[in-house]
Amino acid sequence: MRIDRFDRAILDALQKDGASTSAALAEIVHLSPSQCARRRAALEAAGLIEGYSARLNARKLGFGLRAITRVTLRDHGQEQENTFARFVERHPQIRSAFSVSGDADYVLDIHVPDLEAFARFIHDELLPHPQVGQVRSEIVLRTLKERDALDLSLLEGKEAGSR
């Protein structure tokens, strides 16, 4: 799907407020509400919008510890990767998981209430997993930058969705 400046403006606005109505979008992007509704539906159908959610403050909700954990598997192969992927999916304290290049196979973003909960997860769940060979963790002390929104201006002149 080729997107134009109106689509980018709609996407930018929705990143700031996913609950924006077509009327609110119309004021921002200078199109009619019906045009905004059609464009939004097309962006959703094309998979450029994957969903909508509220951003929650993890620390204020009681998730006082965040750790970045690097995991190296003992063995490599499709079955081992599938087994580890199922493990990751079953554990809600793993907020994000990435297969990466470098000295680790995976990087996990873990959110838990405190150090005791983190130690329990590492020692009782992650380390005993048969596919896990090595685990290295860093506790996040302070977040300098964290953005959920994509800077769509970086795509100027490029077609969205192209690989």
Image (spheres, rainbow, N blue to C red):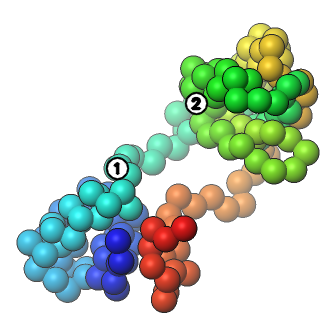
Q: Single out the mark in the foreground, 2 or 1.
A: 1
Mark sitting on residue 62: 2
Residue in the picture at 47% in, 43% down: 56
Residue 24 vertical position relative to residue 119 in the rendered view, above or below: below
* Helix, strand or loop for disc 1: loop
Mark sitting on residue 52: 1
Q: Position of residue 161 (x, y in %)?
A: 45, 68
Is residue 103 left or right of 68 when viewed as pictured? right
Mark sitting on residue 4: none
* Helix, strand or loop for disc 2: loop
Label located before the other in sequence (2 or 1): 1
Residue 5 vertical position relative to residue 67 in the rendered view, above or below: below
Q: How many marks?
A: 2
Is residue 32 shown to the viewer in this render? yes
Position of the C terminus by quadrant = bottom right
Mark 2 packing: few (<14 Cα in 10 Å), some, or many (20+)?
Answer: few
Is residue 135 left or right of 67 when viewed as pictured? right
Residue in the picture at 74% in, 24% down: 80
Residue in the picture at 58% in, 30% down: 62
What amino acid type should be assigned to the residue bearing mark 2? Gly
Residue in the picture at 85% in, 25% down: 75
Q: Nearer the viewer, residue 105 or 140?
A: 105
Mark 1 packing: few (<14 Cα in 10 Å), some, or many (20+)?
Answer: few
The image quarter in which residue 103 lies: top right
What amino acid type should be assigned to the residue bearing mark 1? Tyr
Position of the N terminus by quadrant = bottom left
Is residue 25 left or right of 108 when viewed as pictured? left
Q: Position of residue 95 (x, y in %)?
A: 60, 36
